[in-house]
């Protein structure tokens, strides 16, 4: 699309384009340079701020922090998926007595801030479930609700003729669901589910507030706090931790777009259906 | 107890709304600029836009907040209080998502529109500002509403940095009065739900007003 916004340039346009590219590159580099100069002038590039990260002990601390973060995210997702399936089934039910309370449940947990939920569970039940348990429970409740919406959107994105055909040959609702809708919906919503995993991984950082540990190991941000309390290098520490998060999430994001490419190549789901499913989940991807 | 703290809670939600409002305007401005970068003819600008979006999207908001609140004062000699540093973080973070919403909106405008604008001799800037963006804004009304709702919920994270708003108040009050924690939780949750429903309602109204049937 963006290629239509301007003509394919002729000789003069191409010259202008080269000038523009050079100017644009210079501009980007200049902004980057200004930022780096400010870092330099405020003394962030001093060697003793960065050498701690070469220390094997600190590397192990960070690695275990990343491990704790990944464990929390994985546990929450593993709990959230079955919860999401149950909630989605409830919302798709024909019986209002089941559908209405489930809808209220899902909308409640999607509308409140995750941190409020984490603090509530921690302050109210932390004595019973522990810090890690509080975080995982809150993440599972929230993500279960979000995933149920993704599942529902995925089912809704399957062309209606599919379920109609199922009913026409005399299948019952559960049969249509299991034999026709779910297998097709799974392919449509797989990228959205993986994207939600990225969000969950990001959200585990909120566990910083209740400082959970796994097997005595601090999570990533608390580990960072230990480092900069010792070395006074807060800016480098935040940059290193951001880099770790970005690396983990980029890998997951790349996996999501790989799945999306694959499903739009081999799948029969139309791109419009895919976007419907993804847009429905959009609000929770921020 | 709950009635005694009602004025306090109202103040907390006022702070939440202030954070949301200011950050939303700033994010819309920054996001529009980023979207322009991402569809520009210059590869280096496109690359810069994409790099920004991908970095922010893969970084937890808590870390962005930690950067502006703990690290930024060490880098540049500005002294803002935590409220404004939090606003910077929220705007910078939300802008990436606004940019992506706008870009997908731009991509959703039929190519014939841009082609028509180009064929009557409009430049890249004119095509974008007069023809494509006005139509793009219409298709991005629902996603922008979703982003605003997410921003409202995200303002709660500033509670981790001592900025007073609704979630920070829940933390304070619930620690001091553990016996009424349920009432506090439900009350504050309802406050957020009211805000979320209000935003959703307004955006649904706007969507009906500006929707283009294709």
Image (spheres, coloured by chain):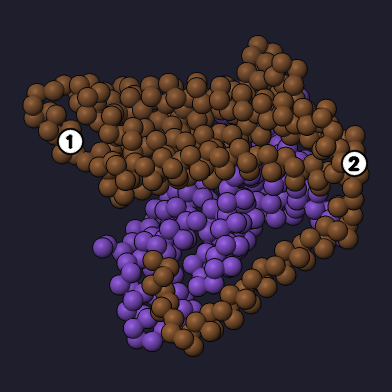
Seen at 42% across and 74% down, the residue is A5
Q: Which residue is mark 1?
A: A162
Q: Secondary structure at mark 2?
A: loop
Q: Is residue B130 above or below residue A149?
A: below
Alpha carbons under labels 2 and 1: distance apart: 62 Å
Q: Position of residue A24 (x, y in %)?
A: 62, 73
| Chain in purple colour | B
| Chain in brown colour | A
Q: Position of residue A164 (x, y in %)?
A: 14, 34
Any part of residue B166 in sight: no
Q: Specify which label sits upstream in the sequence, 2 or 1.
A: 1
Q: Is residue A66 above or below residue B139?
A: above
Q: Residues within 10 Å of mark 1 (few under 14, many from 20)?
A: some
Numbered badge on residue A232: 2
Position of the N terminus of chain B by quadrant: top right
Seen at 49% across and 79% down, the residue is B125
């Amino acid at each position: 699309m963006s290629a239509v916004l301007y003509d394919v340039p002729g000789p003069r346009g191409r010259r202008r384009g080269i000038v523009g590219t050079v100017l644009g590159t210079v501009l980007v580099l200049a902004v980057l340079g200004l930022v780096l100069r400010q870092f330099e002038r405020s003394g962030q590039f001093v060697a003793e701020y960065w050498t701690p990260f070469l220390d094997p002990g600190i590397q192990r601390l960070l690695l275990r922090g990343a491990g704790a973060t990944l464990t929390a995210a994985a546990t929450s997702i593993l709990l959230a998926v079955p919860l999401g399936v149950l909630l989605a089934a409830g919302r798709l039910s024909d019986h209002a007595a089941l559908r209405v309370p489930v809808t209220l449940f899902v909308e409640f947990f999607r509308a409140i801030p995750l941190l409020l939920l984490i603090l509530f569970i921690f302050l109210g039940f932390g004595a019973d479930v522990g810090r890690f348990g509080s975080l995982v429970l809150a993440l599972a409740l929230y993500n279960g609700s979000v995933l149920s919406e993704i599942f529902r959107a995925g089912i809704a994105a399957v062309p209606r003729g599919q379920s109609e055909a199922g009913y026409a040959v005399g299948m019952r609702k559960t049969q249509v669901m299991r034999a026709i809708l779910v297998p097709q919906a799974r392919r449509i919503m797989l990228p959205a589910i993986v994207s939600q995993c990225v969000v969950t991984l990001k959200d585990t950082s909120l566990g910083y507030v209740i400082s959970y540990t796994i097997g005595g190991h601090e999570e990533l941000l608390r580990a960072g706090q230990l480092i900069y309390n010792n070395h006074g290098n807060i800016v480098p520490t935040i940059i290193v931790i951001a880099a770790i998060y970005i690396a983990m999430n980029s890998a997951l994001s790349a996996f999501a777009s790989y799945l999306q490419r694959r499903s739009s190549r081999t799948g029969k789901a139309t791109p419009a259906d895919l976007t419907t499913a993804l847009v429905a989940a959009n609000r929770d991807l921020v | 107890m709950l009635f005694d703290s009602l004025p306090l809670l109202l103040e907390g939600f006022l702070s939440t709304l202030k954070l949301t409002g200011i950050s939303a305007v700033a994010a819309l401005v920054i996001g529009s600029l980023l979207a322009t970068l991402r569809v520009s003819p210059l590869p280096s600008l496109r690359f810069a836009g994409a790099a920004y979006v991908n970095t922010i999207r893969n970084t937890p908001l808590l870390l962005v907040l930690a950067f502006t609140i703990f690290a930024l004062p060490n880098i540049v000699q500005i002294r803002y209080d935590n409220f404004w540093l939090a606003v910077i973080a929220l705007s910078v973070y939300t802008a990436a998502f606004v940019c992506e919403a706008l870009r997908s909106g731009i991509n959703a405008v039929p190519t014939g529109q841009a082609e028509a604008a180009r064929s009557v001799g409009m430049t890249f800037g004119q095509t974008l500002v007069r023809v494509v963006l006005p139509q793009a804004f219409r298709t991005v009304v629902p996603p922008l509403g979703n982003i605003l709702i997410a921003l409202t919920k995200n303002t709660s994270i500033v509670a981790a940095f001592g900025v007073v708003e609704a979630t920070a108040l829940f933390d304070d009050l619930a620690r001091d009065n553990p016996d009424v924690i349920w009432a506090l939780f439900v009350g504050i949750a309802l406050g957020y739900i009211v805000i979320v429903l209000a935003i959703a309602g307004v955006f649904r109204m706007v969507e009906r007003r500006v929707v283009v049937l294709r």
